[in-house]
Image (cartoon, rainbow, N blue to C red):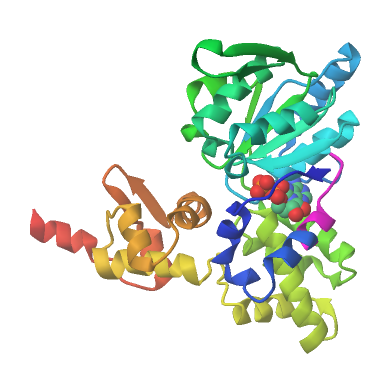
Amino acid sequence: MTIISDDENFKQNNKKNPVVKSESIEYDRTFENSIRPKTFENYVGQTELKETLKISIEAAKKRETNLDHMLFYGPPGLGKTTLAGVVAEQMGAELKITSAPALERPRDIIGILMSLKGGEILFIDEIHRLNKVTEEILYPAMEDFYLDMTTGKSQSVKTMRLPLPKFTLIGATTKAGELSGPLRDRFGIIHRLEFYNFEELSQVIKRTADILNIKITDEGAEVIAKCSRGTPRIANRLVKRVSDFAIVKYDGIITDEVAKDSLKALKIDEYGLDSTDRALLKMIVEKYDGGPVGINTLAAALGEDIRTLEDVCEPYLLQIGLLQRTPQGRKISPEGYRHLGIKDFSAQRNLFED
Ligand code: ADP
């Protein structure tokens, strides 16, 4: 696996998460890379998607050709990058990783495309953030495997067609809706990654504990799974944090008691919400009468990055039903009021308003 170019995105997605506040992001990424599953067997869950991919891989191998271009979408941390790695491993192909914000100038993408060898896999993260020029360079490259290069100026301008080796592009995005139609249409396989259930997260947690060489009970894994927001990345970070507690404050085994105490100390509640999620819900209740309120207003009022709210906080709050999205903005649900331990006065208010 080659990481061609880095971007600020990873940092953006992680800087507000209190679970990683105490350690450097670089260290966290090293940890993340060290535990990435490399085979379908170790890649937990996403069963349907794995079956579809296995068939595509088998077919490509039999035909001795490259795999179709693929688009994986879903919230951060659900395993899009990891899956691209598994696909590359199964194809016996090199994986080159980059991200859309790092492909600013035409020469960035041209350089990468020209360095590709036949069958190689190019992974572009946050692909909805590609600029127009880069996107247009990609169209013929994806469709017919050539690069249109222009040289010279005004009247002496010449167009050259450079053939490219047959490669596979895997795009990942948290916002499939923001991809342009022409780009989306060039992906043969489009898949949404789902949040993981508690059982799947427990498997991820036990595997990571094993790699970290720390003992964990079934109950301990279950407690962490319930607080992991359906997301393996969060599950892994929590195992790491809880294992620190287990080693320093207890006898080195993650039991349900140890897990509960550690998560409490990390200010993670039983739904897996952290201080940012709770601040968001509280803000809607206390300042905006329970909503609806626009996400831009909320981001400004909380002093939070809008992308963190949209990509990290919101999908899970919507999924577990604490938050509702309406055309007028975000609203807290009756379940959201209950979770905060605040009585919902909105029904009485509506009665008076009527
Ligand atoms: P994304 O690209 O969707 O943001 P990643 O692929 O970087 O997410 O996954 C984040 C972390 O979660 C990785 O370190 C990986 O080890 C773990 N992970 C993700 N999906 C799975 C899975 N299905 N099984 C086991 N671990 C997973």
Give the camera-side residue of 246 and 83.
Answer: 83
Left or right of 224, for residue 251: right
Give the camera-side residue of 46 and 56.
Answer: 56
Give the camera-side residue of 105 and 269.
Answer: 105
**Above or below 62: residue 203:** below
Q: What residue is shown at x 72% (from left), y 43% (from top)? A: 81
In the rendered image, residue 290, in percent from the top left (x then y), is placed at 28, 61
In the rendered image, residue 218, in percent from the top left (x then y), is placed at 79, 65
Q: What residue is shown at x 39% (from left), y 65% (from top)? A: 281
* Residue extending farthest bottom: 249
| On-image quarter of the N terminus | top right
Q: Quadrant of residue 70?
A: top right
Left or right of 197, for residue 155: left
Q: What residue is shown at x 88% (from left), y 62% (from top)? A: 211
Residue 47 inside the magenta-drawn segment: no
Inspect this view and state whether residue 60 appears: yes
Q: Quadrant of residue 21?
A: bottom right
In the rendered image, residue 188, in percent from the top left (x then y), is placed at 66, 19
Left or right of 273, for residue 29: right
Residue 38 inside the magenta-drawn segment: yes
Magenta residues, start to end: 31-40
In the rendered image, residue 139, in percent from the top left (x then y), is placed at 60, 19
Q: What residue is shown at x 34% (from left), y 58% (from top)? A: 332
Inspect this view and state whether residue 255 appears: no
